[in-house]
Image (cartoon, rainbow, N blue to C red):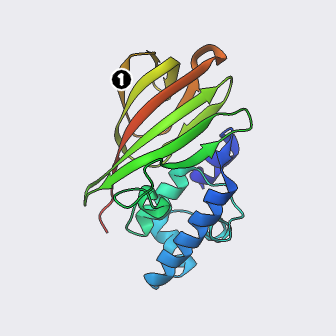
Amino acid sequence: MAGEVEEARMSGGMRPAVVEQLGDRIRAARQEQDLSVGALAELSDVSRRMLTQIELGQANPSVATLDRVAAGLGTTFAALMGVGADGAPDGVEVWSTEAGSWAVLLDAVDTELLSVETWKWKLLGEDVYEGGAGIPVPGIMHHVIEGALEIDTGSEVRVIEAGGSGRVVTGGGYRYRAQEGQAAVFFSVALLARPPR
């Protein structure tokens, strides 16, 4: 499936402790709703094999894949992570690379139609984060604190310099990287449509 190809292209990955925790939470939510792995695969458009590997903590899925799994469960990625009203104030480091890049989910708010997630990112050198594949993204707002952030949506490449802000709307994937292989530190606020259940 398209989402599974994304895992192979993205540099870095989720922290093993986060993957294990998510697997446990996904299994518990699936069982609570009396869904088989096959039923959740149909609802989320993620293969049975990938779902089984995620639940066992044996896969390193992208956030986009986990967004689809969460939507299949009628929830959001942030809620599965335990971030939101009862979440830790420091957030949860979700993605990192060996080179030292990272992404922290700081907070999230869910409504019936929309999930709003606040992230803090640090990208170093040639590290690239790829996301959004298969997930409608009504908008992601960015504010760059340090360096320059390059955002590639496939149809447009946009650069936001330190102190600047910008909004990206995309129906497909997007890529983040620090411009010219330097470092970029930025916040993003993602507006994610929640499919009706």
Q: Which residue is mark 1?
A: 166
* Residue visible at 39% across and 49% down in the picture: 107
The one nearer the camera, 183 or 129, is 183
Q: How many marks?
A: 1
- SS type, badge 1: strand
Q: Amino acid at mark 1?
A: Gly
The one nearer the camera, 1 or 32, is 32
The residue most toward the bottom is 34
* Residue visible at 38% across and 17% down in the picture: 164
Measuring from the top left, give residue 42's x and y in whole percent: 49, 70
* Left or right position of 93 against 157: right
The one nearer the camera, 38 or 183, is 183
Measuring from the top left, give residue 80's x and y in whole percent: 47, 63
* Residue visible at 59% across and 72% down in the picture: 24
Measuring from the top left, give residue 114's x and y in whole percent: 29, 52
Instruction: Find residue 175 and report its image quarter.
Output: top right
The one nearer the camera, 106 or 197, is 106
Which quadrant of the rendered structure holds the N terminus?
A: bottom right
Which quadrant of the rendered structure holds the C terminus?
A: bottom left
Instruction: Find residue 125 and report its image quarter.
Output: top right
* Left or right position of 113 against 108: left
